[in-house]
Image: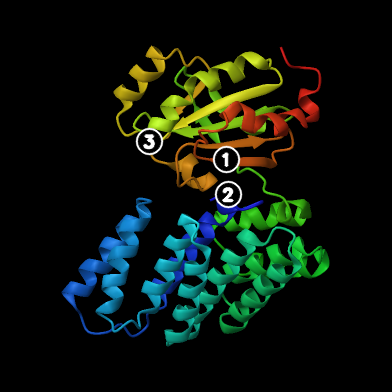
């Protein structure tokens, strides 16, 4: 699913935080139930491994063992459905989580997750933005001490161009001493409110297969195309010739292609890129640090990042009717950095 301006890269961390908050909020857990614990842990592990269908199956079984009244199960289901693009199911799961929550922090986590899902599909739709804002405000009222709720509300307000109120929420977020990543995001948005309205790519630094160190900051001013792939992914392998052609169309001084592999087998990865003469920037993301930062949950995924670090296009999967390069053509054609630069 490619929702217009969908911001799953931005909300990936928030989804995980909502789930963690729901687990932490279980102040009075039920008596030990080995069968429930087994199913719930299976669901949690599948969710962390990006196996969302497996996560849904296990979490539904766990929830049944709680007579369909497990708020943490519903929140985890909401995360899984959101990452699969099943937005209606995600929103329903959030509502069910809120309805069966027995404490304010869990109730707040459910509303925060619903706000996050709504924000991810809102684009410029004022009705959806208002709905997201409403959910975040409920979350803030239920648990004022959680920085993540103030952050979500601030992002929604920035999307609505309510910058003054958004800055107040960001300052509250910082006063609550959030984790390092959230604090850095808040400071960046305070300095440049556009970061709440546009999808800015997270900065990264990688060590390429050629032994070169590259960061997004170093590439400022250039167009960057990110190719997230794996050797075990047939559509990814099929796209290699097109990507090679792309590197021949534009000079590296203007456009940089970076292929980030999710492979577990380093030798298989090295053998493949050597055999296919993939002579552009190659990186093996063995700990999934870059994949998680960009919220990548399906392969292949392609991102186009402009010279200011803003994600201008996100493509997931291959379309048999249209080549990858053709799908990128319109976006690249509108990049001022590439004007007159095609080889």
Q: Circle 3 — which element?
A: loop
Name the mark on residue 315.
1
Residue displayed at 17% across by 74% down: 34
| Residue 315, above or below 157 | above
Quadrant location, the C terminus: top right
Q: Which of marks 2 and 3 is nearer the N terminus?
A: 2
Q: Can residue 177 be seen in this view?
A: no
SS at mark 1? Answer: strand
Q: Which of 81 and 336 is in front in this view?
A: 81
For marks 1 and 3, give the one nearer the viewer. Answer: 1
Residue 258 visible in the shown view? yes
Q: Distance between the residues labelled 1 and 2?
A: 7 Å
Which mark sits nearer the N-terminus, 1 or 2? 2
Question: To which residue does mark 3 refer?
Answer: 286
Label 1 environment density (alpha carbons within 10 Å; few <14, some 14–19, many ≥20): some
Residue farthest front in this picture: 321
Mark 2 = which residue? Answer: 2
Distance in Å between CA atoms under marks 2 and 3: 26 Å
Q: Which of marks 2 and 3 is in front?
A: 2
- In terms of sequence position, does the residue under pointer 1 or pointer 3 come before the other? 3
- Asked where in the image residue 332 lies, by quadrant, the reply is top right
Do the CB atoms of the residues marked 1 and 2 lie less than 8 Å apart? yes
Residue pictured at 70% horizontal, 17% vertical: 253
Residue 158: x %, y % from top left: 76, 62
Q: In this view, does 78 lie to the left or right of 341?
A: left
Residue 57: which quarter of the image? bottom left
Q: Is mark 2 on a helix, strand or loop?
A: loop
Q: Do the residues labelled 2 and 3 touch (CB within 8 Å)?
A: no
Viewer-side residue, 174 vs 280: 280
């Amino acid at each position: 699913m490619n929702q217009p301006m969908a911001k799953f890269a931005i909300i990936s961390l928030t989804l995980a935080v909502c789930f963690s908050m729901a687990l932490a909020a279980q102040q009075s857990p039920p008596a030990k139930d080995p069968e429930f614990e087994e199913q719930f842990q299976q669901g949690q592990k599948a969710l962390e491994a990006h196996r969302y269908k497996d996560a849904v199956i296990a979490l539904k079984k766990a929830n049944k063992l709680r007579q369909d009244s497990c708020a943490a199960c519903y929140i985890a289901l909401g995360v899984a459905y959101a990452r699969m693009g099943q937005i209606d199911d995600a929103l329903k799961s959030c509502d069910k989580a809120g309805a069966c929550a027995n404490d304010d922090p869990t109730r707040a986590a459910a509303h925060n997750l619903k706000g996050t899902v709504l924000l991810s599909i809102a684009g410029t739709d004022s009705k959806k933005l208002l709905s997201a804002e409403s959910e975040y405000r409920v979350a803030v009222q239920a648990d004022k001490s959680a920085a993540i709720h103030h952050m979500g509300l601030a992002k929604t307000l920035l999307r609505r161009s309510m910058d003054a109120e958004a800055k107040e929420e960001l300052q509250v977020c910082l006063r609550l001493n959030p984790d390092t990543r959230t604090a850095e995001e808040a400071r960046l948005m305070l300095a440049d409110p556009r970061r709440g309205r546009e999808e800015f790519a997270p900065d990264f630094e990688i060590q390429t297969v050629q032994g070169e160190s590259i960061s997004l900051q170093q590439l400022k001013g250039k167009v960057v195309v990110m190719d997230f792939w794996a050797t075990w992914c047939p559509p990814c392998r099929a796209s290699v010739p097109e990507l090679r052609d792309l590197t021949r169309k534009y000079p590296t001084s203007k456009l940089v292609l970076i292929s980030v592999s999710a492979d577990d087998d380093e030798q298989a990865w090295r053998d493949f890129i050597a055999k296919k003469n993939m002579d552009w920037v190659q990186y093996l993301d063995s700990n999934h640090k870059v994949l998680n930062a960009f919220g990548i949950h399906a392969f292949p995924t392609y991102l186009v990042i402009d010279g200011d670090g803003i994600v201008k296009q996100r493509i997931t999967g291959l379309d048999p009717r249209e080549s990858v390069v053709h799908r990128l053509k319109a976006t690249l054609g509108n990049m001022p950095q590439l004007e007159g630069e095609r080889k």
